[in-house]
Amino acid sequence: MGRFHRHDAAHSDHYHDANGNTVWYTDEEIAQARAREKVSEKYGDHSGYETGGSRVQVLEDIFTENDKLAASNRAGFAENGVTCINLMSSPGSGKTELLTATLRKLADEIRIGIVEGDIETDLDAQRLRPFDVQVSVLNTAAGFGGECHLDAPMVARALQDLDLETLDLVLIENVGNLVCPAEFEVGETAKAMVYSVTEGEDKPKKYPVMFRSVSAVVVNKIDLLPYLDFDMELFAANLRDVNPHAEVIEVSAKTGEGIEQWLDWLRRQWSGRQPVAPTVSAERA
């Protein structure tokens, strides 16, 4: 659609189409078109859909409502002195393994709560049960339409099962997906992602929204590098092209290599409340 030009005549605007013809619109049509342009800049062009205008309006309403509740979640974290990290990745990158390694090392130092997001099952939460931490399981199939991401309303529901007054750090394990989770604010202090070397070097350019949204990229499974053709320098260059500010942390959650750098990053995000070490289960020894 062409750009609009405001005229002195009341209730009228026009634009010139591809053939140079002048097309006039009412104020209501102009407002709708401008809203579509504004939202399309943020959420993409939906004009190819038969219901393009309606889709754009729905998207705007959804994101506006989500952002309001994200602000409420963020205020709740701030009120309780809690730092919240939204941890994202594709399926199978090793988020839960990284959380396990994190709890093994950090739960004695910082009081941690976990939001475990998945479409179905509590399999990931079961892996964290040997640790004396609060875990809230959030299945998006249970009342949230089986969404492939967590949003602010979902996280608000999950937080009802955590006692924020007794926590310093909340780690949200988002649903495995390299697209949608990056588009929804949930009230986090910072976003980070786990990236497996088995995924290749090209994903920062293929999924730029995700990589652009994070403050840290944890490159996991580096113990497999001797068996792969993964080019770490090429990956880092592709990442810099879309997000030159993201910190890159190379780890093996399985062997523990590089975990201290990840823990140091978490400590830097932590809001600074004086932690009270929890009683640690004997199973963690």
Image (cartoon, rainbow, N blue to C red):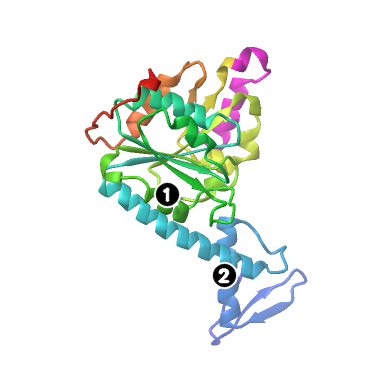
Q: Secondary structure at mark 1?
A: helix
Query: Which span is picked out in magenta?
Result: 224-244
Dot 1: few (<14), some (14–19), or many (≥20) neighbours within 10 Å? many
Q: Nearer the viewer, residue 92 or 204?
A: 92
Residue 182 in the image: state x and y as whole percent. Answer: 53, 45
Question: In the displayed structure, would residue 166 be above or below residue 99?
Answer: below
User: Which tag, 1 or 2, sits closer to the chain's start?
Assistant: 2
Q: Quadrant of the rendered structure where residue 38 is?
A: bottom right
Q: Secondary structure at mark 2?
A: helix
Can you identify the residue that label 2 sits on?
34
Q: Quadrant of the rendered structure where residue 267 is?
A: top left
Q: Amino acid at mark 1?
A: Ala
Residue drawn at the location 60% of the way across and 36% of the way down: 91
Q: Residue furthest front?
A: 282
63 on left or right of 134: right
Given this view, does label 1 or label 2 mark the residue nearer the observer?
1
Residue 64 in the image: state x and y as whole percent. Answer: 47, 62
As for residue 98 lying within the magenta part, the answer is no
Residue 28 in the image: state x and y as whole percent. Answer: 57, 81
